[in-house]
Amino acid sequence: MQMPSITAAYLAVLALLYTVLAAQVGRLRRGNRIAFGDNGNPELRSAIRAHANFIEYVPIIALMVAMLEMSGLPAMGVHLLMLALLLSRLLHPLGMYAAPNTLQFRIGRIGGIAITLLLLPACAVMILWRTLMVI
């Protein structure tokens, strides 16, 4: 079994992105003097959801990719999965700050979550397949 060093490198980049999303929430809270919730502020609401959406999906997908990497998935496969995750997590916040039904919204938010929602079952199925092939 090998260490998931490819996944780890992508996780470091994703952690930097997560830091930016968290800092954006903090900046908006401070600037609008809102300690809890969003107080009806749409910009803060978007920042909170971009931040939350990241943490709702990244850990489980990254963990599954790490398991696939440790099980011997070729490096190219690991790179493709983690690049797709990184792309989805870059796109989604861009869409969260766009007006609904604009091109930026569709590409960012809808494209980002679509990639994420494809990765989730794809990784799960690959893990199940690889597990069943070992038994």
Image (cartoon, rainbow, N blue to C red):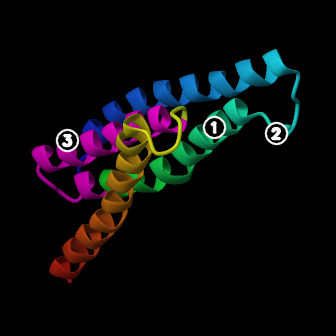
Residue 3 in view, yes or no: no
> How far across and how far down the image is residue 59, in percent?
48, 50
Checking the image for residue 11, the label placed there is none
Q: How crowded is mark 2: few (under 14 residues within 10 Å), some or many (20 or more)?
A: few
Assign a secondary structure to mark 2. loop
Q: Which of marks 2 and 1 is in front?
A: 2
Residue hosting label 1: 46
Please tell me whether residue 22 is drawn above or below residue 113 in the rendered image: above
Q: Mark 3 or mark 1, which is nearer the start of the sequence?
A: 1
> How far across and how far down the image is residue 38, in percent?
80, 38
Measured Cα–Cα span from mark 1 to mark 3: 29 Å
Please tell me whether residue 45 is drawn above or below residue 126 in the rendered image: above
Q: What residue type is labelled 3?
A: His
Q: Mark 3 or mark 2, which is nearer the start of the sequence?
A: 2
Residue hosting label 2: 40
Quadrant of the rendered image containing residue 37: top right
Checking the image for residue 79, the label placed there is 3
Q: Which residue is drawn at 31% across and 41% down?
A: 7
